[in-house]
């Protein structure tokens, strides 16, 4: 099968995460001042420092760039290869000192997520991979779980969504729910086989999930929208209707399982 990623893409992702780690060294989670961009969406100097560090080493001529912390440009829409980045996914947790934030770097080729790297410094997890090369967790080969029964499956939920009561209907079901911050980190855990699934039935931006989507696909899992639809990236409107990521053996069951819950959204 013909490769869709370049031979050096994973090395470039590693270099970007290394640059992000260095940029974060002056900052201490839980001791960082934040201002609000809009509503209750925080922004810190650390977000901007990581954004600049990654952008300085990652995109090459002819490639698009789309980051939560960089002013968007329609130029990216005409590019076949686009880097989609969230410098700190889970900034709220970063500000509060909760170890559930990460750096998220994704590569989209032809509107499909094909490679990514997610680094959780606090948890000591770095997940890197591509659809051509598979996935590694801290340098060791990894893959989604081999679970085929949704009963007892570990499903990671959004801490904010749980707080708002949006997971109340899921708690009586046979799944095991664990709530945490950073959707990108949740996706990385699914890709690494440390959880069976994660989903959100509310809108998310492309930068929240691009890297994780690539990693889950690369690890043998499935990703799709809340109604079972295929998700396309590098769109003019980057707001997705929701997102589902599951171990491959659970895909059909999760699609059916979510239908009545989606109807109630």
Image (tube, rainbow, N blue to C red):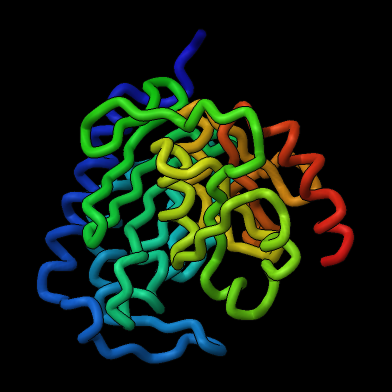
* Count of numbered circles on the image: 0
- Residue 111 lies, in percent from the top left, at 60, 39
| Residue located 24% across and 71% down the image | 49
Residue nearer the viewer, 84 or 118: 118
| Residue located 16% across and 65% down the image | 23
Q: Is residue 184 left or right of 56 when viewed as pictured?
A: right
Q: Is residue 255 left or right of 99 when viewed as pictured?
A: right
- Vertical placement of 133 versus 126: above or below? above
- Residue 7 lies, in percent from the top left, at 31, 22
Residue nearer the viewer, 149 or 60: 149
Pick out the residue farthest to the top.
Answer: 1
Quadrant for residue 224, please give it.
top right
Q: Is residue 74 left or right of 67 when viewed as pictured?
A: right
Q: Quadrant of the C terminus?
A: bottom right
Residue nearer the viewer, 212 or 53: 212
Let me know if residue 211 appears in the view.
Answer: no
- Vertical placement of 197 versus 205: above or below? above
| Residue located 24% across and 29% down the image | 140
- Vertical placement of 161 versus 177: above or below? below
Let me know if residue 171 appears in the view.
Answer: yes
- Residue 85 lies, in percent from the top left, at 41, 56
| Residue located 59% across and 79% down the image | 163
- Vertical placement of 198 versus 12: above or below? below
Quadrant for residue 251, please give it.
top right
Q: Is residue 239 left or right of 100 when viewed as pictured?
A: right
- Residue 249 lies, in percent from the top left, at 62, 27
Residue nearer the viewer, 81 or 26: 26
């Amino acid at each position: 099968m013909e490769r869709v990623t370049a031979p050096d893409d994973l090395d470039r992702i590693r270099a970007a995460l290394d640059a992000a780690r260095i940029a974060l060294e002056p900052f201490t989670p839980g001791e960082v001042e934040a201002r609000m961009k809009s509503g209750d969406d925080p922004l810190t100097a650390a977000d901007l420092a990581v954004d600049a560090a990654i952008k300085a080493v990652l995109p090459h001529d002819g490639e698009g760039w789309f980051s939560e912390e960089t002013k968007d440009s329609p130029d990216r829409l005409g590019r076949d290869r686009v880097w989609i980045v969230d410098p700190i996914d889970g900034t709220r947790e970063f500000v509060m000192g909760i170890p559930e934030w990460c750096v998220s770097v994704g590569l989209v080729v032809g509107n499909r997520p094909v490679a990514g790297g997610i680094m959780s410094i606090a948890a000591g997890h770095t997940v890197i991979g591509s659809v051509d090369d598979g996935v590694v967790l801290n340098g060791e080969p990894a893959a989604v779980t081999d679970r085929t029964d949704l009963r007892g499956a570990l499903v990671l939920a959004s801490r904010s969504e749980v707080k708002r009561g949006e997971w109340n209907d899921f708690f009586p079901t046979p799944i095991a729910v664990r709530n945490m911050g950073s959707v990108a980190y949740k996706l990385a855990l699914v890709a690494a086989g440390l959880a069976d699934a994660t989903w959100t039935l509310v809108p998310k931006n492309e930068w929240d999930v691009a890297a994780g989507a690539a990693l889950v696909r690369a690890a043998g899992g499935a990703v799709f929208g809340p109604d079972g639809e295929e998700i396309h990236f590098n769109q003019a409107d980057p707001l997705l209707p929701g997102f589902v990521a599951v171990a491959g053996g659970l895909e059909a069951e999760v699609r059916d399982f979510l239908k009545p819950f989606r109807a109630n959204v």
